[in-house]
Amino acid sequence: MCFLRRPGASAGWIWWRMLRQVIHRGLQSFFYKLGLFVSRHPVFFLTVPAVLTIIFGFSLLSRFQPDTDLESLVAPSHSLAKIERSLASSLFSLDQSKSQLYSDLHTPGRYGRVILLSKPGGNILHQADVILQIHRAVLEMKDGRRSFIGHQLGGVMEVPNSKDQRVKSARAIQITYYLQTYGSVTQDLIGEKWESEFCKLMHKMQLDHQDLQLYSLASFSLWKDFHQTSLLARGKILVSLMLILLTATLSSSMKDCLRSKPFLGLLGVLTICISSVTAAGIFFITDGKYNSTLLGIPFFAMGHGTKGVFELLSGWRRTRENLPFKDRVADAYSDVMVSYTMTSSLYFIAFGMGASPFTNIEAVKVFCQNMCVSILLNYFYIFSFFGSCLVFAGQLEQNRYHSVFCCKIPSAEYLDRKPVWFQTMMNDGHQHTSHHETNPYQHHFIQHFLREHYNEWITNIYVKPFVVILYLIYASFSFMGCLQINDGANIINLLASESPSVSYALIQQKYFSNYSPVIGFYIYEPLEYWNGTVQEDLKTLSQGFNTVSWIEQYYQYLRVGNISATNKSDFISILQSSFLKKPEFQHFKNDIIFSKAGDENNIIASRLYLVARTSENTQREAVELLEKLRPLSLIQSIKFIVFNPTFVFMDHYGLSVTMPVLISGFGILLVLILTFFLVIHPLGNFWLILSVTSIELGVLGLMTLWNVDMDCISILCLIYTLNFAIDHCAPLLYTFVLATEHTRTQCIKNSLQEHGTAILQNVSSFLIGLVPLLFVPSNLTFTLFKCLLLAGSCTLLHCFVILPVFLTFFPPSKKHHKKKKRAKRKEREEIECIEIQENPDHVTAV
C-alpha cells in the first residue's frame, strides 16, 4: 500500500490523518462485529434487558420514597449562611416561646401563618373583632403547645402631615404563630398535626367570613406544594408518552408495506421507557429519594434515546437490500453506532461533571447522577433490546412479510387481480421501483420531501440572504437576553402554580414588600460598648436601616435619665441592675450574653435587628444587602455576622446554580479540543463547537426574555441543551466535511438527505411530547416546557436553516475533490485517445 502526499502537505499531517483513519475504521469494525453478534443471538439480547427491567421495576414500586427536606435539595449545600446560622445558634439558643421576631429564629421550625386581606377599599383595622375571633380560634386549637405571635400590617396608609407616622388604614394584616417543639421527634409530629389542623381551620374560617380573604401557610406547605407537581404531572406524562409513541410510529411508516417500520418506531420509544424504569429502580435501590425535579429525566432520556433509534432506522435504510438481514444489521451498527457512542459519551461527561463535588445544589447533583445512569442504560438497551427488534424486523422484511399484519405479501400478479383497497394495504412498492432506482427507501415521505423540495429550496441563492438576516435577528435577541439574566433564588419557581404557598407569596409580595426581612446582626466578640468610637461605628453600620436594638434603647435610657456610664463597670452595672429590670426592656435579656470572671462581668456577645426599606423586588434587594454587609465585617473593627433564615436559599445562589453548566460546558469543550486531531476531520469539531455555542447562547438568551430565571431546572435544561445540540449537529457536520462531491451545496444536500430524516423524526417527537407539560399547573413544569421547547427549536433551526446556508459560504473547501476528479477524467480521456490511435479500425467498426 502506498500513500500519496499532496504537494505542501507535511509528514506529520499525513501521520495524523492515517491515525484518524485507523481509529475510525477500528471503531467501525468493532461495531460491525457487535452488530453481527447481536443479530446471531437476538433472543438473548431481547431477554436480558426485559428481565433487568422486571427486577428493578419491582424495586421501584417497593422502595419509592419522597425527599421531604426541601432546604437540602434547593439551597446551596456549602454556603456562608449555613455557617453563620450555626454560629448564631451556638451563641443564642433557640427558644421560640420567648422570641418576638421571625428573624430571631435560626431556622423557621414549625409555624402557621395567615394573611387577612380586606376587600378593595376596605380597612382591616375596622374588622378587629373578626381578627380577634380568628386569633382566639387558633389559640384554642388542641395540641398547640406554647406559641408566640408576631404580626405585621400591609398596604398601610398614613395620616397626612403626621409627624409620628400615625396609621390611617391598612389593607392586610399578617399573623404568625410559632410553635415550641424543642427539636424532639414526638413534639415535631405534634407540631405537624397542629399545622394541618391550622390550615383546615383557616379554610373553615374563610367560609364563615366572606368579607375577608384568608391566605394560610405552614412550614410543611413548601414541601407539600413542591411535591404536588409530581402528582399533577402524572397523567400528563402518560399523555406525553402516548403522543411520542404515535409520532414515532407514524414517522417510521411508509406506503410500502414491506419496508415500512411502524412497529420499530413504537418499540424504539418503549425501549427508552423500560431503560428509564430500570434506571429509576437502580436509583431507589441505592437509597435514593424522589423529588419533583426528577420529572425532567424521562424527557431528557427520550430526547437522546430516540435519536439513536431513528439513526439506526436510517442506517438500516442505507444498507443494500440484496444483503442478508444479519449483514444489514451489522452495516447499520457500523454506520451509526460510532457517532452515537461519541454523543452518549459526551452526555455522560456533561452530566458526570454536573454530579461532581463542584456542584453546590443537591437537587442538580441528584438529577445529574440519575441522568448518568439513564444514559448508560439507554446506550445498552439501544444496541441490545432495540437491536434485537431490528433483527426480527429485518428477518420479516427479507422473507417478504407484511410490516403490520406479519403475513406473507402476495405476488404482483395476484395483487393486480384484487381491488384497489387491497392493493393499497399490500403494496410493497413494486410499481414505484424501476430498473434505475437502487434505493426504494427513498419513497419515505420525509426523505422524499427533503430530496425533492426542501434541499433545493434552502440552498437557493435567493433564500440565503434571508437566512443570514434571520440569524442576525436570532443572535441579537439572544445577546440581549444574555444581558438580562436573573438568578432564580425564589422558591416559588419550583412550586405548583395554583398552590396555597404561591398564593400566599404573591399576596405577601404585594402588601408586605415595603421592608426587607428582619436581619439579625450578631456581634460575636467582646466589645467596648461604652466607648464613643464604638458607638459611632455601630451607628455607621446601621445607617439606612430601621433598627430594633438594645444598644439604642439603652443609650436613650441613659440620656433621658441623665446618667453617666463612660466606663466598663458603670456601663454593665447600670445595664444589669436598672435597665434590664424595667418591664418594657426585659425582653432584651435574650439579646445579651454576659460572662463573669471573678467579680467582673463582661458582655461577650450581643445581637440587634435591622430592617431596610425596599421596593417590590424584596428578594433581590435582600441579596444586595447581604452582599453589602458581609464585606464590612472583614474591614470593620467590630466583628459581626448577619443572618436571616431566607439567606440560606439566597446566599451566592446565582454562582451555585450556574456552576454546573459552566463545568459541563468546559468539560465538553475540553473533550472536543483534545480530540481535535483524532476525529476524521478537525473542521468537524470546529464547526460543532461553533454550532453548540450558538444554540446554547440562543436558548439562554431567549429563555431569559421569556421570563425564565436561572434556577436548578433551567440550569439542568442548559446542560441538556449542550448535548442535544451535539446529538443532532454532529452527524450532519461530519458527513458534510467528509463528503467528496464537487461543491459545498451538493455536500450539504447529501448530508441533509442522509441524516435529515432522523433529525426531523426525533425533534418532532421530542417537541410534540412536551405539549402536555403546558397543561400542568406548576411553575416547575412551565420552566421545563419553555427551556426544552427552546432547545428543540433552536437545534432544529440550526440543523435545517442556518447550517445548510452557512456551510456553503465557509470552509471546508471542496475544490481539491473537484481537482482530483478532473485529473482522473483527463487521465481517462488520454487513455481513450491512445486506444483510438492504436486501433482506428475498431472505432470505424463501432
Image: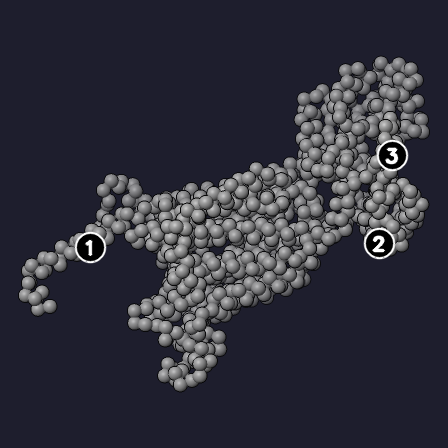
Residue that numbered label 1 is attached to = 825
Q: Is residue 374 left or right of residue 171?
A: left
Which is more toward the observer, 780 or 527?
780
Going by the image, does 665 lie left or right of 534? left
Q: Is residue 164 visible?
A: yes
Tag 3–tag 2 contact (CB < 8 Å): no
Q: Give 216 or 127, whichever is nearer the viewer.
A: 127
Q: Is residue 23 left or right of residue 267?
A: left
Q: Distance between the residues labelled 2 and 1?
A: 88 Å
Closer to the camera in the image, 410 or 275: 410
User: Residue 495 location in percent, x, y?
Assistant: 70, 50
User: Is there CB contact under 8 Å for labels 2 and 1?
Assistant: no
| Amino acid at pointer 3 | Val
Q: Mark 3 points at which residue?
A: 167
Element on which disc 1 rests: helix
The label on residue 133 is none
Q: Distance between the residues labelled 1 and 3?
A: 96 Å
What residue type is disc 1 on? Arg
x and y percentages locating residue 774 in the rendered image: 63, 56
Q: Is residue 310 above or below residue 629?
A: below
Residue 587 horizontal side relative to residue 274, left or right: right
Ranked by sequence position, the earlier of labels 2 and 1 is 2
Q: Which amino acid does label 2 sit on?
A: His
Location of mark 2 (residue): 203
Furthest-front residue in this view: 462
